[in-house]
Image (spheres, rainbow, N blue to C red):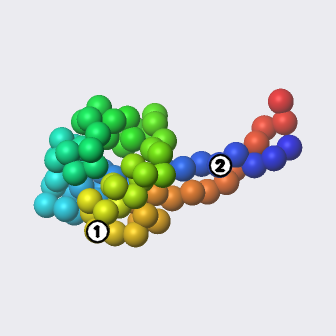
Amino acid sequence: MGEKLIITNNIRRLRFFANEMTQAELAQKAGVTRQTIIALEAGKYLPSLELAFKISNAFVVPIEEVFECSTQKADAS
């Protein structure tokens, strides 16, 4: 029995506080498509380390403010 890594993000909240930055604006700043930002916000996609840094740079915040990591006990299946 181990632990499962859970990675969440605050992209939607950060966009709101960045003068309601659109998904398209963030995508352009990070060099990805709007669909990538949608998938990230929905928790359906985990970014590469490079993309994570590009997103944090777009908001001018530390990466830890954009992405959070926690652990959860894995099921004994």
Q: Earlier in the sequence, mark 1 or mark 2?
A: 2
Q: Quadrant of the C terminus?
A: top right
Q: Which mark is residue 12?
A: none
Q: CA distance from mark 1 to mark 2?
A: 26 Å
Q: Residue at x 40, y 58 (%)?
A: 53
Residue 20 placement, left or right of 51:
left
Q: Residue at x 17, y 47 (%)?
A: 25
Above or below, comparing residue 50 to residue 61 in the picture: above
Q: Quadrant of residue 39?
A: top left
The number of callouts visible is 2
Q: Which residue is mark 2?
A: 5
Residue 3: percent from left, percent from top = 75, 49
Residue 31 placement, left or right of 68:
left
Residue 17: percent from left, percent from top = 22, 63
Q: Nearer the viewer, residue 36 or 19?
A: 36
Q: Which residue is mark 1?
A: 60
Q: Quadrant of the N terminus?
A: top right
Three-letter code, disc 2: Leu
> Element at badge 1?
loop
Q: Residue at x 57, y 57 (%)?
A: 69
